[in-house]
Image: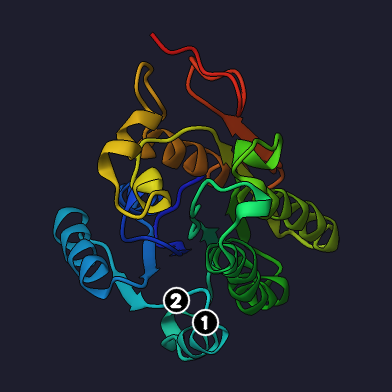
Amino acid sequence: MVSLKDKIVFITGASAGIGRASAELFASEGAKLIITARREQLINELAEGLNNKYGINVLPLKMDVRDREDVKSVIGTLPEEWKSVDILINNAGLAKGVEKVFEGDFDNWDTMIDTNIKGLLYVTRLVLPGMIERDSGHVINLGSTAGHMSYAGASVYCATKYSVRAISDAVRIETADSSVRVSSVDPGAVETDFSNVRFDGDKERAKKVYKGFKPLTAVDVAEAILFCATRPEHANINEIILSSTSQANSLIINRK
């Protein structure tokens, strides 16, 4: 397990769920963290908590990955001591709605595409050149089992996660002549705020998604991310697919 002490780790969508769990795990390994999210108060509180608990340096930054100019501004004005990002965790992502294509909500489509695809591209585009220049770095993208099997009511969400898979594969090819590594971590059902966001705050409906089986936790996925990041430099984890023991694929879950 390679040491992460003093490595600069940039995490998007760090205010909750997998992003927050990843921040906690990487902090426990002594990494220096840049944590970003739209909810400024939450990441400020997280930064303070991690600093007090682990004594590490944390830089919390309000950033909306959907806003290209915002991403340019935030990454372009990083303090000099934070510019050399060692590990980028493209975690920010979401699902909105469960309508069929012929009933779909245009705004929901835009939100998913702008966050899950374009946001990931914006951040990667601005962080990756530094890694190429230093011939060192690791991009870890959060995909999904939805990027391996589509299901009804999630056509656009699945399309965005297939895109994450395609982008990860392409960037791995494009950086093959360097020491930069590219990984994708693709979880199945994870009990976070994901379903609550998908159903616009309908908590009862969200709870039903996880009824009758034990889903993955945010920590389960964060541990997979950490595993990718701590392999020897000559070893790259191209892709990890993980799910609850009760979940065979995107369509089949054994509920009791």
- Give the SS element for disc 2: loop
Label 2: few (<14), some (14–19) or many (≥20) C-alpha neighbours in 10 Å: many
Instruction: Give the x, y percent position of residue 109.
Output: 59, 63
- Give the SS element for disc 1: loop
Q: Amino acid at mark 1?
A: Asp
Compared across the picture, whether 18 is left or right of 171 comes to: left
207 w.r.t. 128: above or below: above
51 w.r.t. 30: above or below: below
- Res. 16 in view: yes
Q: Residue at x 52, y 46 (%)?
A: 98
Q: Residue at x 16, y 54 (%)?
A: 53
Q: CA distance from mark 2 to mark 1?
A: 6 Å
Instruction: Tell me the colour scheme of the image.
Output: rainbow
Residue 164 found in image quarter: bottom right
Q: Residue at x 50, y 52 (%)?
A: 95
Q: Amino acid at mark 2?
A: Asp
Residue picked out by circle 1: 67
Nearer to the camera, 222 or 85: 222
Nearer to the camera, 8 or 141: 141
Quadrant of the rendering where the C terminus is positioned: top left
Instruction: Give the x, y percent position of residue 158.
Output: 65, 46
Compared across the picture, whether 204 is left or right of 7 comes to: left
Q: Which mark is residue 213?
A: none
Instruction: Give the x, y percent position of residue 132.
Output: 72, 72
Residue picked out by circle 2: 64
Q: Would you say the residues marked 2 and 1 are in contact, meaning their CB atoms lie under 8 Å apart?
A: yes
Q: Residue at x 36, y 36 (%)?
A: 191
